[in-house]
């Protein structure tokens, strides 16, 4: 009898303990699950524009409609003479220093890492040329390739002299410029040395070779840049530079030094570069011969103009 009573009490105790444990689990489970159930409701209260990513930056002033692969350069200049490779194109004209109006336009196609083709033309109008005021038309085409620290350019130039067809000719050329900022670890080049070579394949069958340097002096916060340059030329078997028929046609031919000042009209009038850049330009050159047996003129000449880049 006593054994049955003890057994009943033990069973009752186990049942009560099990019931208490179940009740405890029922109370604890909602407390643990509550954050999970409340999380979606909390997310719906976040602002719609809240994000873990930074908001997009506003457009810069230099970000404009011409961010594609085509660029255009155009310049109009007034010059006291038309001097090219040390030789005045106005030689023999009575009023050779009367105004020369010059136009230069160029179209570049940016193909990324590939060579960039370009096409352009230079025109000189001499106000006192007795034969043709359109004294010279010089179309050109070529490729430009930035292989830093070298910039390689090559192409073809055609020389057209209206009403003077006997002077027309053409040449192929190549130019290599060294970007010395790579060597000196600077933000911009120091002297940008270059070597230029041209071969006249049409009329003269001769070579023209030139080497030069230049440096830009940038005046911060003024919009003004002054460029100083210098070059020297050597000709080889090129009768265009002979002073007499069948005369000397090889040797150092001329040197040139110059200053070019560029003032940003965008800076002056607070114009955004996204609409193109306008530049007021002034230039002054001095050319001199290095040999009395080769054709070259001693000239101090210059002018002013306006340029546009887009």
Image (tube, rainbow, N blue to C red):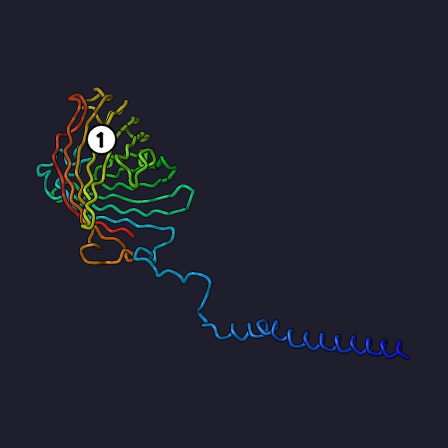
Residues 15 and 305: in front is 15
Residue at 17%, 33% (x, y): give it: 257
* Direction left: furthest residue: 94
- Residue denoted by label 1: 231
- In the shown orientation, is residue 7 left or right of residue 148? right
Q: Looking at the image, which residue sits at the far front? A: 2
Percent across and percent down for residue 187 are 30, 41
Q: Nearer the viewer, residue 18 or 224?
A: 18
Q: Residues within 10 Å of mark 1 (few under 14, many from 20)?
A: some
Give the residue displayed 18% in from the left and 31% down from the top: 256
Residue 284 location (% of width, % of height): 14, 39
Q: Residue at x 20, y 43 (%)?
A: 124
- Quadrant the N terminus occupies: bottom right
Residue depicted at 25% across the width and 49% down the height: 74
User: Residue 238, percent across and down?
Assistant: 26, 25
Horizontal side of 99 relative to 215 (left or right) equals left
Residue nearest the observer in this picture, 249 or 66: 66
Q: Please identify the quarter of the rendering in which residue 295 is found.
A: top left
Q: Position of residue 126 (x, y in %)?
A: 15, 43
Q: Nearer the viewer, residue 260 or 181?
A: 181
Above or below, comparing residue 51 to residue 197 in the picture: below
Left or right, 198 with respect to 40, comes to: left
């Amino acid at each position: 009898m006593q054994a049955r009573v003890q057994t009943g009490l033990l069973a009752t105790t186990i049942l009560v303990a099990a019931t208490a444990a179940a009740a405890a689990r029922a109370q604890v489970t909602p407390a643990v699950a509550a954050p999970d159930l409340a999380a979606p409701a909390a997310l719906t209260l976040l602002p719609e524009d809240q994000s873990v990513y930074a908001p997009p930056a506003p457009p810069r002033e230099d970000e404009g409609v011409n961010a594609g692969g085509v660029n255009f350069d155009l310049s109009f200049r007034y010059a006291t003479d038309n001097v090219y490779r040390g030789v005045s194109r106005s030689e023999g004209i009575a009023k050779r220093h009367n105004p020369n109006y010059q136009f230069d336009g160029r179209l570049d196609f940016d193909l990324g890492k590939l060579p960039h083709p370009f096409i352009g033309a230079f025109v000189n109008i001499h106000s006192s040329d007795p034969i043709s005021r359109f004294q010279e038309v010089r179309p050109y085409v070529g490729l430009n390739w930035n292989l830093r620290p070298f910039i390689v350019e090559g192409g073809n130039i055609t020389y057209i002299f209206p009403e003077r067809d006997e002077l027309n000719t053409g040449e192929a050329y190549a130019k290599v410029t060294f970007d010395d900022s790579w060597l000196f670890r600077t933000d911009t080049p120091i002297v940008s040395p270059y070597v230029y070579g041209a071969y006249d394949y049409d009329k003269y069958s001769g070579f023209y070779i030139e080497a030069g340097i230049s440096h830009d002096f940038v005046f911060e916060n003024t919009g003004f840049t002054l460029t100083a340059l210098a070059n020297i030329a050597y000709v080889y078997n090129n009768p265009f530079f002979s002073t007499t028929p069948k005369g000397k046609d090889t040797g150092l031919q001329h040197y040139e030094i110059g200053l070019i000042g560029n003032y940003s009209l965008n800076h002056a009038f607070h114009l955004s570069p996204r609409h193109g850049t306008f530049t007021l330009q002034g230039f002054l050159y001095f050319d001199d011969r290095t040999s009395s047996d080769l054709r070259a003129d001693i000239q101090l000449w210059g002018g002013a103009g306006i340029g546009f880049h887009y």
